[in-house]
Image: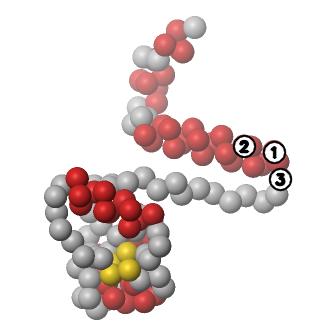
Amino acid sequence: MCAEEGSTTLLNIADWFSDRDISYRVENIADKTVRLQAFLSGKCDVMASDRTALNSDRFPAPDPVAYAILPEVIFNEPLTLLSQPDAELETAVYWAFQVMLNAEAMGVNSGNIDQVWRTSPISRR
């Protein structure tokens, strides 16, 4: 498995594999380009990273769709946003992100928001 040296990904995959009593070996590669080349050349059978990065990382491959991103999320990393130095914008972005993050965790989406609202205790006030 190729993973970023010194990242929290290493701790997360260690926990995941340990919980399932599965042995594995990690190639700790700090440089992203070198890590990707190691994976695409077959040095690693698996590459561990966040879903967003993996989606873009497979594009340099001769056949990008041949590389499957597995559906199971083994850990949620605290990815976040960066805003311009503007207190009002920062506050708005922060709370919008928190709402989206929590909605996703609770399974709320644009297809079911009306039903969720109708059954919410808050909507009855």
The answer to whether residue 110 shows anywhere in this view is no
Q: Left or right: where does residue 74 sit relative to residue 123? A: left
Q: Residues within 10 Å of mark 1 (few under 14, many from 20)?
A: few
Residue 76's spot in the image, x, y percent?
Answer: 42, 52
Residue 70: percent from left, percent from top: 26, 62
Look at mark 3 in the image and give the residue it sits on.
Answer: 86
Q: CA distance from mark 3 to mark 2?
A: 10 Å
Q: Element at badge 1?
A: helix
Crowd around label 3: few <14 · some 14–19 · many ≥20 (10 Å): few
Amino acid carrying label 2: it is Ala
Q: Give the number of the disc on residue 20.
A: none
Look at the picture and state if 101 lies above or below 8: above
Looking at the picture, tell me which residue is in the foreground, 95 or 13. Answer: 13
Residue at (43%, 24%) from the top-left corner? 116
Q: Does the residue at mark 1 contact the one at mark 3 (Cβ under 8 Å)?
A: yes
Q: Position of residue 5 (x, y in %)?
A: 44, 77
Tell which circle, 3 or 2, labels the residue nearer the N-terminal end: 3
Residue drawn 26% across and 82% down?
Answer: 44
Q: Are marks 1 and 2 in contact (CB under 8 Å)?
A: yes
**Picture quadrant where residue 49 is located:** bottom left
Q: Where residue 41 sits in the image (x, y, percent)? A: 28, 91
Numbered badge on residue 92: 2
Residue at 43% from the left image edge and 75% from the top image edge: 4
Quarter holding residue 59: bottom left
- Label placed on residue 88: 1
From what the image shows, is residue 15 above or below residue 95?
Answer: below
Q: Say which element carries label 3.
A: loop
